[in-house]
């Protein structure tokens, strides 16, 4: 029963899926271009190469705008289109770019972030397994120039994901400002792997 009405419905469905795919691709390309233009201003924190830290290696789980576990794309889109909300828009990490800062951030990350975001930041922690949308892929985010934008990072951790429909909690009530900045430094340093025998505080 291949009626003309059924064929027309099928044609419309295929056309709408094709248009949706084109729109998604266009948005991904536009966001990629916007991210590429976001370079740190002179004097702004740039943790790559700091404190003996090298770039976090990208792998098949972290490549591409539309790769797996991209739970933080709505926030990036909002920030790209509308900017960071006040008062976070003028924040700057006051902590020194030091190995001590990164190590402190790593210890806080292990306790407060790793359960959902995973040890390597790929959004694959056990506590985040059934979350929808899934936890953001911080290893992927740490490769983007925008991630070095201090206001964006602090705002994300402080306010959590409620405004974007995610389960990420707001840490402004449970972590001190310096703790949030230390975690920010750790992520901006591309989540350097801590030695296995390193004590976690």
Image: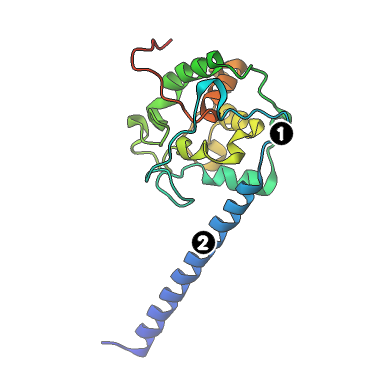
- Front residue of 83/34: it is 34
Query: Residue shown at 35%/83% (left/top)?
Result: 6
Q: Are marks 2 and 1 in contact (CB under 8 Å)?
A: no
Picture quarter containing residue 150?
top right
In the rendered image, the vertical position of residue 114 relative to residue 195, given as above or below: below
Q: How many discs appear?
A: 2
Picture quarter containing residue 132?
top left
**Residue 197 position within the rendered picture, expressed as x and y whole percent measured from the top left:** 34, 12
Q: Answer with left or right where residue 28 lies relative to residue 7.
A: right
Query: Residue shown at 61%/48% (left/top)?
Result: 36
**Residue 111 position within the rendered picture, expressed as x and y whole percent measured from the top left:** 42, 19
**Residue 60 position within the rendered picture, expressed as x and y whole percent measured from the top left:** 37, 46
Tell me the element at label 2: helix
| Outermost left residue | 1
Dot 2 or dot 1: first in sequence order is: 2
- Per the image, the residue denoted by label 2 is 25
In the rendered image, the vertical position of residue 81 relative to residue 192, given as above or below: below
Tell me the element at label 1: helix
**Crowding at mark 1 (Cα within 10 Å: few <14, some 14-19, many 20+):** some
- Front residue of 170/92: it is 92
Screen quadrant of the C terminus = top left
Separation of marks 2 and 1 at Cα, in angstroms: 29 Å
**Residue 161 position within the rendered picture, expressed as x and y whole percent measured from the top left:** 53, 36
- Per the image, the residue denoted by label 1 is 89
- Front residue of 14/62: it is 62
């Amino acid at each position: 029963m291949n009626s003309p009405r059924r064929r027309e419905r099928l044609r419309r469905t295929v056309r709408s899926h094709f248009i949706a795919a084109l729109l998604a691709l266009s948005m991904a390309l536009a966001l990629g271009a916007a991210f590429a233009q976001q370079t740190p201003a002179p004097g702004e924190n740039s943790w790559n190469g700091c404190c003996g830290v090298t770039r976090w290696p990208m792998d098949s789980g972290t490549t591409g705008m539309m790769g797996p576990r991209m739970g933080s794309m709505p926030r990036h889109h909002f920030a790209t289109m509308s900017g960071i909300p006040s008062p976070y828009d003028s924040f700057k990490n006051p902590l020194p770019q030091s190995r001590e800062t990164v190590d402190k951030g790593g210890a806080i990350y292990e306790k407060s972030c790793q359960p959902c975001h995973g040890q390597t930041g790929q959004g694959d922690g056990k506590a985040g397994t059934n979350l929808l949308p899934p936890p953001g892929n911080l290893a992927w985010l740490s490769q983007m120039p925008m991630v070095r934008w201090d206001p964006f990072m602090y705002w994300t951790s402080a306010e959590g994901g409620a405004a974007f429909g995610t389960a990420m909690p707001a840490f402004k009530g449970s972590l001190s400002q310096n703790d949030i900045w230390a975690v920010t430094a750790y992520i901006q340093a591309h989540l350097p792997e801590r030695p296995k025998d390193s004590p976690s505080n």
